[in-house]
Amino acid sequence: MSGFVPGRRVLAPLAALALLGAGGAAHAACAVGVPGVTGRVDIGQTGRPLLLHRPAGLDPAAAPLVILLHGSGGTGAKMLQASRLEATADRAGFILVAPDAGIPVGAGFAWNIPGVPTVTGKIPDASDADDVAYLARIVDSLAEDGCIDRARVYVTGLSGGGRMASWLGCVESARYAAIAPVVGLRAGNPTAGNPQEPDPATCTPSLPMPVIAFAGDKDTVNPIQGGGTGYWQYTMNAAEQRWAALNGCQTAPTTRWVAPGVYEERYSGCRGEAEVVGRITVGGAHVWLADNDALWAFVSRYRRD
């Protein structure tokens, strides 16, 4: 941990704030950020500072963490503004981080999902930053510094960030307790021979992964009906069904209206009670459509022990 910068203010390194126990061993006290203020932090010596929001009065030892991933070509700062999750974090009591992805795209960045082209059409290679490892280091560092409850780490994101959240569910299910993609739910890469189906070999979580996804039925970028660019193709419903199969859901899916113009598709009876939920906004486009309180109510039910 190197410091926190809300504007021009910098805090001392975390090591200088360690507390010494009776036996002389150093016990880290969470010194990440200024409570109630969103600022830029360099975590885990990654060299990639991110924005962090820690609500005032939060017990760090028991604090959940929500990782917010921006869309392709975006930034963590813009994603914080669009999502309005800082207010949700203050009400619900969780730490919120908004990192930048590792692949530069225009004035922003794109996430490295192996085997999947970015919006530029280029498939990431060994020269590109490993975003799975980067995000894992964020979690590990915050946990080691006594800032979060490692068992309660959740990932959400918009568009390309939603696809990255889906990928983390596929490859890091032991690290993340639930995912909440927004206009970006996937369940692995499209199958080469039949891109209208997800390739089972590209999504093999070791544990059931609770999923709540948000989308709009008028999204022309990542259409819920499928099609679109090469990384998309199969429908949102196919993604939901694949996650339900991965989670061993046994109950027939249900559909119901949950708000004016918003209906929900829910798969229950799953291993570890890891439900799969899709919320569709009628007329909704390619924007942040999440009901933040519903998002938090769902993911906060889960923990990794």
Image: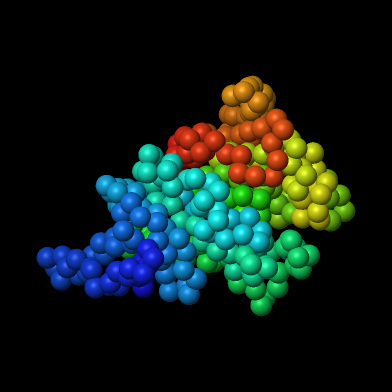
Residue at the extreme front: 7
Q: Percent from the top left, x then y, of residue 286?
A: 69, 45
Is any atom of residue 290 visible in this view? yes
Colouring style? rainbow
Q: Which quadrant of the view contains residue 110?
A: bottom right
- Say left or right for 76 vs 239: left
Residue appearing at x 64%, y 35% in the figure? 278
Nearer to us in this view, 87 or 298: 87
User: Toward the viewer: 194 or 108?
Assistant: 108
Report whether 254 appears left or right of 43: right
**Residue 131 x/y as whole percent:** 58, 65
Occupied quadrant, residue 23: bottom left
- The number of numbered discs placed on residues in the rendered structure image is 0
Q: Is residue 293 rendered to the left or right of residue 219?
A: left
Which residue occupies 49% across, 48% down? 154
| Residue at screen point 51% across, 52% down | 80
Residue furthest left in the image: 22
Residue 284, x across and y down, in percent: 69, 36
Residue nearer the viewer, 216 or 193 = 216
Q: Outermost residue toward the bottom?
A: 127
Above or below, 209 against 123 in this view is: above
- The image quadrant where one finds the N terminus is bottom left
Q: Residue at x 35, y 55 (%)?
A: 37
Residue 226: percent from left, percent from top: 80, 43
Which residue is most to the right? Answer: 193
Quarter location, residue 7: bottom left
Say whether residue 206 is visible.
Answer: no
